[in-house]
Every structure is written in C-alpha cells, then in structure tokens.
Amino acid sequence: MVMPIRKIILTCWLLFISCAVVWAAPLRRCAGCDKSLPEGASVWLLKPATALAEYYIETGVIHPDQTRLQKEADPTGQVPVGTYLYLCEECNKTKISCSLCGLPVREGFVETGDGRKICRREAADVVLDLETARQIFETGTRQARNVAGIDFGLKQPGITVQLVDMIDMAEKADGGHTLGFSKRSPTIHYVCLLSGQLKRAVITTSAHEYMHLWINENIGSRQIEKNTVEGICELLAYKVAQAEQDVFQQRQILTNTYTHGRIHDLIEVERQHGFYYILDWVKNGATRTFDETPAAVKKPMPVSSAPRPLPAASASSVAKPDTLKLKGMFTKRGSRLAILNDGVTVAKGEIATLRLNGLRVTLKCLDVLADSVVLQLVGATNSITLEME
Ligand SMILES: [Zn+2]
Ligand SMILES: [Zn+2]
C-alpha cells in the first residue's frame, strides 16, 4: 500500500520539477517545512496524493497560505485544475516522501525498520515499538468491547501481538486489510500489526482484528461471505472511530475497499437490529450474507394442502437459540421487579447482565409495567418490550 503512494508522489514531483513559477501572492509558505516564501522566490507545486494530506488541507493543519487553488488549467498545461501544495526549493529537492501523508521528509522524521520515513507531522504519533503496539491494541480492543454494548470476550483470552515492518500477504487468509492480520492456532490468538501507522489507525485496526478473532472462535463450520466478514470487522472499527470522535478514521473505513461496500450494509443492519443481532447471526445464522434468505425458506411451499401431521414431540428437544424472556414479576419495597432469564432481576433504571447463547448481554431496564418490561440493549437505540408468557 505504501510503495504505490510513494511512486505517485515521485511522479508528481518529476512532473513539476521544471515548473518553477513566480507569483505575486501576498503570503506563501512551504507546506514541507513551513518556511515563508518571499515574493519573487521560486516555488514548486505538489499535488497532494494521500487522503491524510487532503484531510490536513481540509482541517487547516496545512494552512491556506501553504496551498494554491488552481481554478483553471494554466496555459502551459503543466498545472491542471486542483489544489496544490507550495514547496520551497529545498523541500522540492528532497526526493523522500512521508509514507503516511506523502509530504517531503527533511527534518524531525522517524523511520521504520524497512526504511519508510514518517515526517515531523506524524512522528510523535506513530507506533514503532512493540510495547506501544501492545498498549494501543489493548486500548483498541477495550474500546471495541465498550462500543459493542455487549461483553463479547474471547473464549481463549491470550492474544500474542506482533509488530512487523511488512505484512506477509501470503500469511493473510482474507487478502483485504493491509494494516494488520489475525490468525488462530489451536492454542493462541495471534495479531500482527504493521509498524509506522498512526496510533489512531492502530486503534481501529485492533478493533477490526479483535472482531476477526471472535468470528474465528464462533463461526464453527458455517460459511459467511468473505466481504461480509470484513464488513462486520470494519463495522466494529467504525464504531470505535465514532466513539473516539475520529472523523478521519471514520472516513477511511467508509471509503476503503476492503469490504467491497459491505460496510454500508452492515451499518444499516446494526442500526436496525443492534450489534448483538450481528453476533448472534455469526453464531446461529444460516445464510452467507445478511441479504440472503435461508435456503430452507426459499423452497417453494408444498402444493398439497393435505393436513400435515403435527411435529413429533421429540422435535422440541432440538436446541433452540435462547431468547430474552420475562419469567415473572414481583414487588419489593414498593418497586416492581421483573425476572428475566437465569433468574436475573431488574427494576426501572437498573442495568443487568445475563448470558444468551453463550454471550454476555448488558441491558438497561427502561420500565417495569403491570405485565410487561421494557428493556434496551446497552448501546442500542431501540427498546424491547417483553410480556409475561
Ligand atoms: Zn520547504
Ligand atoms: Zn507525513
């Protein structure tokens, strides 16, 4: 992912290297080193080639006096319409570009083991050592469990985190995510993170990889479409980016191609049904994607209208997925309490945790009425009303 970006930048530079132009602009500064460019000084233009550089322009990290908006193509045809960054002569000469933002690298940069340079803008904010990688992974996965509203811990909790300078694509089963990957041996979970990434990107990558580990543990022998798996992982990463109020990461997740657009479907599924529904579908669903109808339902209805025998009593012994139930109600010291699965009791305003299909589900009791209880999954926006059976 890094090499092509560098290639693009070098190409742009070569394109503009001969384009020394003189403008009578009031104030201009080099986007590479912030040096002011006095009137009459030669300036070079660089086309921003990364989403991060564009985000810097949009948010003012790269100041307007460091950019030039070319509204019409110049007569020589060398500067097409677009927004460009001003560069001073020294920055233009530096043929090394930052592996993250694509800007020239001169001073105050850091370097990864495989020689990628990261400019002063991001130098303090990237993950270059294993200890930091482990801490950020911990932060990202904790946040992931928080935003899911459900404690969906791993059965096998130990995770070996590794930091690498290159992701070995041959080891990646999914072929999608280029900033990390995860795998499970019979005894350990293993997560590999790419060095030299912004901490905030590592946080969302950690959430993504954590979701892969959970899916690996719970998918059993069932088949789920690859892009849907990636979509579920990116959904959790997206929710973490939202919780972190990280607009850039949210945008990266919505626009990257890892999920081939599935992320948008998954956001909608979660909006309608909540995150627990998605986890339950992974464990107990029968379709390969959310928009498929299970094969059993697709079969045409039998033409014969002859009455069919009632299902044998043994059919009820087939394990059915647990559902949330209101098992009873009582009053204690003037307040009404509802009894849910496993004898868990809740009063209005209380939060309770119970297990459903092997998952811990955290609920808030919104109200206890005469013969029903109104509940809400923590993190969900819709409520569930259960009545006495
Ligand atoms: Zn400069
Ligand atoms: Zn940079």
Image (cartoon, helix red, strand yellow):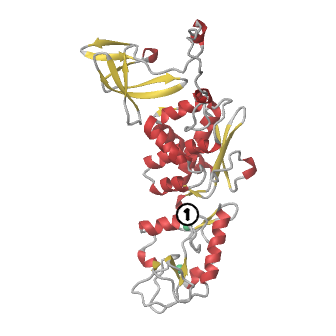
Q: Is residue 182 visible?
A: yes
Question: Around disc 1, counting alpha carbons within 10 Å, would you say few (fewer than 14), some (14 to 19), or many (20 or more)?
Answer: some
Which residue is at a point 42% across and 87% down the rendered structure image? 25
Kindly identify the amino acid type of the residue bearing the numbered disc 1: Ala
Q: Nearer the viewer, residue 343 or 376?
A: 376
Q: Secondary structure at mark 1?
A: helix
Residue 121 against residue 79 in the figure, above or below: above
Q: Quadrant of the C terminus?
A: top left
Which residue is at a point 64% across and 81% down the rendered structure image? 14
Q: Nearer the viewer, residue 40 or 5?
A: 5
Which residue is at a point 56% across and 9% down the rendered structure image? 310
Residue farthest along the top direction in this orientation: 313
Q: Quadrant of the N terminus?
A: bottom right
Q: Can you give x and y, in whole percent of width and height, for residue 24 in the image?
A: 43, 90
Q: Which residue is mark 1?
A: 123
Q: Can you give x and y, in whole percent of width and height, for residue 148 in the image?
A: 48, 37
Q: Is 115 situated left or right of 61 in this image?
A: right
Q: State the image quarter where residue 301 is shown.
A: top right
Q: How many marks?
A: 1
Residue farthest along the right direction in this orientation: 170
Q: Is residue 153 visible?
A: no
Which residue is at a point 54% across and 49% down the rendered structure image? 204
Residue 9 against residue 78 in the figure, above or below: above
Quarter of the render that holds ligand 2: bottom right
Residue farthest along the left direction in this orientation: 334
